[in-house]
Amino acid sequence: MFQVLGSAWALLLGMLLLMIGNGLQGTLLGLRGAIEGFSTFDMSIVMSAYFVGFLGGSRIAPLLIRRVGHVRVFAALGSIISGVLVLYPTLTDPAAWSILRILFGFCFSGVYVTAESWLNNATTNDNRGKALSAYMIVQMAGITIAQFIITLGDPSGFVLFIIPSVLVSLSFMPILLSVNPTPAFDTTKPMSLRQLWEASPTGCVGMFLMGGVFSAQFGMSAVYGSLAGLSVAQISTFVATIYIGGLILQYPIGYLSDRMDRRRLIMFTAAAGAIAAILGAAFQGNFAVLLVAGFLIGGLANPLYALLLAYTNDYLEYEDMAAASGGMVFINGVGAISGPVIVGWMMGLIGPVGFWVYLTFLMLLLAGYSLWRMTQRPSIPVDETSSYTPVLPSASPVAVELAQEFDIETAQEEERIDEIEP
């Protein structure tokens, strides 16, 4: 781990500041929208717009990098992000916010692509898994820290919007001034969605559903808190517990993933997530229980993304794993776009409990589909499955492809060891 920090500290520090800025604006908009009198449906469109931009950016950013290079793309997108953050409180209109969110999502996607390319360049086969873990921890830590910064200011003012703008501007300094060379950039030709479906229907359906779950958590949890009458401090704590759960439970689920039938684990994890959501719906008036429900739903939903990637890899040849990353990210992105809109409509229809009803439905759907698929195809023996590598739903195709490559290298190394040992 110290070797990873030594080679990629500037990138990790920059990403920490970036994620604090991203986490601040996500929750802050939910709070400010309620103050400005935006409807729940208006806010759902605003939150969904981020994922529209993010999906587009994941496709276009590689073209920009090939054309003008990493440094210019990184600096240009960072400047736009910083500017967008200070425009939110001056353009308090749902349509304007939606446009700004599309731009924000597009730029953040490009920043992720660029940063993750640098991360790949700063690691070797020996420390790539540790680098991915460190990167994930930094992302989750940044979003969590952001929630507590929000309690230090007034969401109706300008200061809390200026802080993330400054943090984003500062985040590029350690990265752009570091001595690490600019990496060569190349992406694998993606696998078609039809090929992905034929390889793993469970992986495709799960990725789509997890996109909806993640975007509801990331985009609508603060909106839910405002609608439920929680204070700013309570909303910040609630959102933070979702990400803390996603970090802490990532590793136990990853441990089980390499030791049991993954389809069963997907089913049990999704079913447990549904129970957690039901708990939140039944006791949303009790803040302590609400925190437990948030911790569990975040802790169970976030690892499912990496678990579904690992499960899909079990049905792919080594040469196809990296190619599958683009398609899996696209499926997840499509699901993410629809998530805030549907949960916003449900909360407008039946109140804040709609947030939990939506999460319950998607988790039960995944659990039920996984159970049905177990009757359609036999499971792969545990000792023949690929490794589990932690990766977040917010990752760009570059990080997912990086995780896929690490899985390939790990599996090939295990095969070489098996051949040598009698």
Image (cartoon, grey):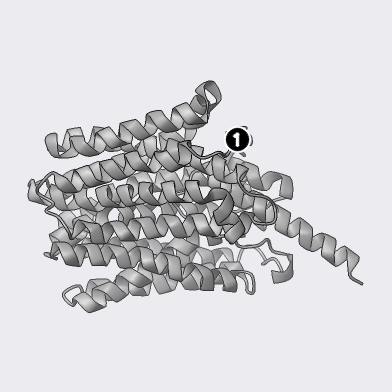
The residue carrying mark 1 is 183
List x then y, in percent, for residue 49.
Answer: 29, 39
Relative height, residue 139 to residue 261 (above, below): above
Specify the amino acid type for callout 1.
Pro
Q: Is residue 90 left or right of residue 251?
A: left
Q: Could you tell me which residue is drawn at 41 percent across and 31 percent down?
A: 75
Residue 295 vertical placement versus 92 (above, below): below
The local crowd at label 1, few if under 14, some if 14 to 19, many if 20 or more residues have their Cα within 10 Å, is some
Label 1, secondary structure: give it: loop
Compared across the picture, whether 152 is left or right of 270 comes to left
Q: Height in image: 83 above or below 252?
A: above
> In front: 347, or 385?
385
Q: Which residue lies at the image location 15% right of the left edge and 46% below the top edge?
A: 159
> Residue drawn at (54%, 59%), measured in percent from left and top?
133
Asked where in the image residue 301 lies, by quadrant, the reply is bottom left
Percent position of residue 312, x then y: 61, 55
Can you tell which quarter of the image residue 184 is in? top right
x and y percentages locating residue 218 in the rendered image:
32, 54
> Is residue 192 depicted above or below 340 in this figure?
above
Q: How many marks?
A: 1
Res 300 visible: no
What's the residue at 49%, 44% (across, down)? 396
Pick whichever, 89 or 172, lies toward us.
172
Q: In the rendered view of the protein, which quadrant contains the C terminus?
A: bottom right
Tell me if 252 is positioned left or right of 24 in this view: right
Question: Can residue 383 be spotted in the picture?
Answer: yes
- Residue 122 locus on image (x, y percent): 60, 45
**Quadrant for the N terminus in the image:** bottom right
